Structure formats: structure tokens, C-alpha cells
Image (cartoon, grey):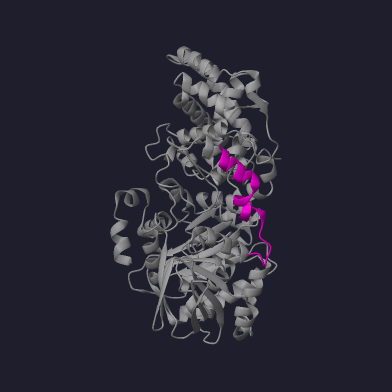
Amino acid sequence: MYDLIKEQIGADYFQQKYSNDGQRFVAWYLRNILFRDMNEARDDITDGADDKQIDAIVIDDDRSLVRIVQGKFVQGGVVDAEPLREVLSSWIQIKDLARLQNVANSKLKRKLSELAAALDDDYEVSFELIATGCLTDAAAHDLDAFQQELAKLSEGEIFNATLHVIDDDELRRRYDYALESDNPSISYKLNLAGSKYMHHEIAGTPVVIAALPLKECIKLPGIKDGTLFQKNVRQSLGSSNAVNKGIRSTIIGDKWSDFFFFHNGITALCSKMELNSNTLSLWGLSVVNGCQSLNTILSCSETVKKTDDSFILFRFYEIPQRDRADKISIYTNSQSAVKARDLRSNDKRVLSIKKAYELKYPSGYFISKRGETAPAAKDASQVVDLSEFAKNLIAWHSQRPNLSYGETKIFDKHFETLFKNKNYLPENIFALNAWMREVLKTWVIANPLSLNETLLAMKAYAPYHHLYAIGMCFSISNNQAERVPSPNKSYEAAAKVGMVEEIVKVAGISLNMALEAAANEVQPSNRVFSPQNWIKSKSCLAGINGALRNYFSMLPMMPGGGEIKKKLSEATTLKPDDFEYRWSAD
């Protein structure tokens, strides 16, 4: 992997944006394995003087996860224990964020502010040492000790943390799967030589039941990045989950040999499987019950590697039918509480909205299940995803784009508000989707609106503020600042006079102005302005509204501004009946 990465980081992007190969290696990992875009990757990296052994901090709002990354780009092929001690040092320092922020460099100070906000929302912390070599035996021993110590110290602490080493072999495996990200079907050959197993056919379905050693489990691809659990109703709940704590306690305690008897087992589906001798070949592999267990087992990887008498029950079913697989995923997870957000795709209000939309737009498609794809014959411009639709709803109708980043809260706390009306007009669904598609056309590498680079680094959630600003263009123009315009009526009015792109431009420029104005405000002593925290707060909304009003008032003084203002006024004029009061989300 060293030679491959060395060649790839020779590209202009890495050479021009990063000052040394260490930073370039971490940036390569963020870009190629974690799929961060160019702006996000630059924003994530904290490496440099006074980085306090923290090369990058990646905050994943969708998974409620913070990754703290330390990279070692070495050619020799081996990594000793020193980098592990650096990772452990960063964990100790993060326990006292106030002190660390006082001595850190400016980039790290800002990321620590975001980290504090994430910890307040109970995000899990994953410390990741990425290296182009393999651990020495002594370092592997230290990793085992560190993992156990971290597990014990995390009990009762202000946050729960896990430690992972992504060595040369794991980097290769993750890179290979990243190359197939557009078709994330997992194929795998499982060695059953050290396992007890039996092969049967039940109800016409091939079934393999196996008592699999735990050390074989950690070899399964797609655990940490979640691709192994695409058909699962939920992803990892983190190490703070009570059940996961119990699993981890058994593994690192003195009862590991009884793990098989303590655990209910894991259910895995595949589209096809073949058993030849002691090799089980699996195509389209997906674990539908066992996400929590496999993530927890992986977090204790070094301990697991040393246990020969610790097993877990695996059930492999050949289930090519999607509807049957979905039912198995739900029913096998019913033994423990499944949160509402995991099963919203089957809520009658969602199904009603989906049916109405697809009836109104036969060439469109409403994706209600995670991992589902629209049929190839459908018009891509009319494909709507449930998760994105919900984020658009809260940004537009609740006027709270600062909440759009939190999918978990949307489908738990705010679901009843957002989906109270199962008769929500299909035309509004279409219009919200159309507005957002126009917004995203401006959030590209070419950066046609000349947005601030810091703003572009927040592509995961800032576009919803852009959508909010579009709605406010109509509200302000019609003196209806306390009310919300109809998505459909507003899109129709703008499209009728060919001003959709211009309104998107005005909204984007105003968002940019609001961010820059906030960044220039005097900060309290020892405080650093954090764009990510600003964009997630309600205070940013007043800034966007103020920037919009300033833009409209300044237009007549710009060259050709009078004509533009006249066209904007025509494009944004709606009837009073085209507005409604916002849906409360506070």
C-alpha cells in the first residue's frame, strides 16, 4: 500500500494543498476511504505544530460518530508502539478539552469546539491509527492492553471511546471495497475449518449454521464502514449502549469461553452461497442481525485474536428475494427495542406519501428504505429519498435548517411534526426536490457562486441553510417573514419567469455573507469562531435573514440592479393564501 499511496499523493491536489507526506497520507485516507470531499478533508486535518498527536478530526453526524485520526506513513513495513502511545495521549488530553484548547494550534482549537458539541450529543469517539505498516509483536501486545484499558476507563466517563489500528492489510481491504462503493455488494469466502457447522435446506432455502470463532468474525469485510449491514434496520449504536458494554465485558473478562452461550447469535443473508469442503463462498453478503455485536467484537480485536475457545453462532441464509430479506431484517431485530427511526420506512404516513407521489409522477420514485435504489427506467430528476425529503421539510416548513443534519432527531423527536399530514401534496414534494437539486448544482468543485471555502467544507448540512434562504426570499419579498411559502407555488412562480437560478444565486450569496459577517464578529476571550457550530445554531438564521434584506436593499445601487430587483419581485410575488405558519420543531 505504501507504494500505491506514494504514487497517488503525488497528484497536484495533495502536493499543493498539504505541506508534507504525513498530511497527504491522512488526506488520502479521508478522501479515498471515508469519502470526504476536498474541502471537508482540508477542514478535518489538524496536523502541524501543536497538533497534540491529533492529525485529523472527522465528525460524522449521520452515524453520531467522531473519528480522531493519527497517521503513520512509513516505508519500513513495521510500526512500533510509539504511535499507539500517541493515540492514547490524545485520549487523555481530550478528557480535558478546556486545557487542550488553550495549548492547541488554531485548526485544532476550532475542531475541538465542534468535538465538544458532538460529545454533548452523546457521539461515540473512535480513535484510529492508520499506518502503511504492520504492528510489531510488542506493539500488538500494547494494543491489546490499551483496548482493554480504554474499555474499562470508558465506563462512567463523559464519553465512550474505542481504539482501532488500520494497518497495511486493513488499508488494502478498505481501499478495495471503496473502489466498489458504487456497487457495495460484498462477496466473501469464509474458512470454516476451525468451526462446527451444518448445511441444510429449510422451506426450499439453503441454510448454513456455524459456531464461528470470534477471531474469524473480525476478518469479515464491511464492519467498520457499515457496508456489511446495509439491510439491517439500524447501524452501530456505539460502545455506550448497555448491551454492547456487556458484550465487551465478556470478551475482555474471564468468561470469554462462555461467549457462545451468552449470545443469541448473528443472522446473515446472501443472494447466493456455495459450500465446498471447508470453504463457504458468499455473494451479496449482509448481516441483518448482529451489527452491534460485530462492531463491539472488532473494538476488542487484539484480545479476540488470542482466543481459540470463544465462538459465536452464525446463521447464513440464501435469500435472493428483497421483500423476504426486509421482513427477516425486521423480525430478527424484534428481540430488543428497535427505535422508531429504524422502522419509519414502513410508517403508514410515509407509505401514503410515497404512493401519492408515484401516482402523480409516474416517471418518479420515492425511496423509503435505506439502501434502496430507484429502478433504472425512472427519471433521476424525479427520484426523492425519504431521508433527504425529511431534511428538506424541517429546513423549509419548520425553518430550522440547523436541525437538518441530525437524521436521528428528525426521525425520532420531530417525526410526528414533519409527517403529521399524510396528505402532503406530491407537488410540494416535487418542488422541494427541484429546489434542492438546483441548490446542489452550485455546491460543486467549480463553485459558481464563489462560496467561502469554509462553507463548502460543510456540504453535509449547509445546503439546507441555502434551501431555507430560498424560502425566506419569498417570505421577505411578500412581507410574510413569520410565515412559510408553499414550495410548489414558489417554484412555479420562479420558473414561470425563468428566475429559479437567480433566486438560488441570491440565497447562496446571502448565506455566504452571513457566515463571513459572523466570522468577523469579536469573540469572547479564549473562544475561537467555529463555522460548524454556527451553522448548527439558531443564531445563524437571523444572520441569513439580515443578509437577504441587505442584498435586496443594495440591489438598486448595483449595475443593472434595478432591473434584477424588478424581475426578482415578479418571480417571488405570491398570494397570501400561498403562505402558512411554520411547523414548530423547538
Where are the magenta residues, as a range?
333-356
Name which quarter of the figure residue 93 lies in.
bottom right
The percent position of residue 342, horizontal first and vertical second, equals: 62, 55
Q: Is residue 141 left or right of residue 178?
A: right
Q: Is residue 209 left or right of residue 248?
A: left
Q: Quadrant of the C terminus?
A: top right
Q: Is residue 29 left or right of residue 64?
A: left
Residue 96 visible in the shown view: yes
Q: Give above or below for 254 relative to 340.
A: below
- Asked whether residue 109 is drawn in magenta, I would say no
How many callouts does the rendering have? 0
Comparing 394 with 248, the one in front is 394
Comparing 422 with 238, the one in front is 422
Q: Quadrant of the N terminus?
A: bottom left
Q: Give above or below for 579 relative to 290.
A: above
- Asked whether residue 343 is drawn in magenta, I would say yes
The percent position of residue 390, horizontal first and vertical second, equals: 59, 42
Comparing 76 with 120, the one in front is 120
Name which quarter of the figure residue 151 lies in.
bottom right
The percent position of residue 222, horizontal first and vertical second, equals: 46, 65
The percent position of residue 543, horizontal first and vertical second, equals: 60, 31
